[in-house]
Image (cartoon, grey):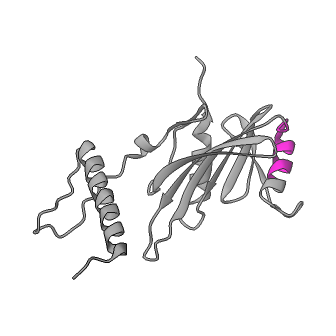
Amino acid sequence: MSRSPLRSRVVPSARRIVIGSAVVLASLGLSTTVPASATSTYSAASPSTEQRAGTLDGFVIENLPDGIGTPSDFEYEWEDVSFHSRVWETGPDPDGAYKVDLTVKTIRGEKLTDLEALKDFLVEYEEKEPGSWQLTPVKVGGYDGLFSGDEVFYFVAPGVAAEVTIDHERFTDEDVLDTAAGFHPESTT
């Protein structure tokens, strides 16, 4: 029986992928073989809250609620304002979806001159209805901010602000405010 042309192209390609993956795993000190008696999948222990905190764009992250997922960092820009964010997600759920637990972000741009300018920028950026966003003035550490249940944003200095959002179904107002109080510029001393 002759080999099909498709099979002869696919098998070497698949073989290269498997061999390449084995080489990468071996270089990381991981094994690609599992004893036949193994009944569960190996997974590394999640890093502690302290290991997942650290710093982001010159800001310290000190307070995180328990039960948040795995962090990922992002950088992007909109309307000459730059964002650095760290997002913690849990998942996948049975449908394969992930859910955002918490986001902290720094916001930097010349148009951020005070808290009102920050609010106006976020109304446009987040596509809020002007006047309908119910915000409560709060102090976040020593900074003036505005709070709306699942998020708080605060003005740090001309050109610098921060925002914290949280999954309000799983976490409380206190969780978002505590996280925000622990998200501040690094000390220069």
Q: Looking at the picture, how far across and down is residue 120, in whole percent?
A: 86, 49
Q: Quadrant of the C terminus?
A: top right
Q: Is residue 94 above or below residue 71?
A: below
Q: Is residue 102 above or below residue 8?
A: above
Instruction: Specify the quadrant of the image occupied by residue 169.
Output: bottom right
- Residue 52 visible from this viewpoint: yes
View extreme (front): residue:
2
Instruction: Specify the quadrant of the image occupied by residue 154.
Output: top right
Q: Is residue 79 above or below residue 168?
A: above
Q: Quadrant of the N terminus?
A: bottom left
Task: Judge whether residue 120 is colored magenta.
Answer: yes
Indicate left or right for 88 with 127 as reference: left
Q: Looking at the picture, how far across and down is residue 32, in whole percent?
A: 21, 57
View extreme (top): residue:
189
Q: Residue at x 42, y 76 (%)?
A: 94
Q: Residue at x 17, y 59 (%)?
A: 33
View extreme (right): residue:
131
Indicate left or right for 100 with 140 as reference: left
- Residue 44 visible from this viewpoint: no
User: 51 or 11: nearer the eye?
Assistant: 11
User: 145 or 100: nearer the eye?
Assistant: 100
Q: Residue at x 80, y 41 (%)?
A: 80
Query: Tag count in the figure?
Result: 0
Indicate left or right for 124 with 182 as reference: right
Q: Looking at the picture, how far across and down is residue 139, in whole percent?
A: 72, 41
Question: Magenta segment, which residues?
Answer: 111-122
User: 53 or 1: nearer the eye?
Assistant: 1
Task: Judge whether residue 47 is colored magenta.
Answer: no
Q: Residue at x 25, y 65 (%)?
A: 41
Secondary structure mostly seen in magenta is helix
User: 153 or 27: nearer the eye?
Assistant: 27
Q: Looking at the picture, how far across and down is residue 98, in whole percent?
A: 50, 66
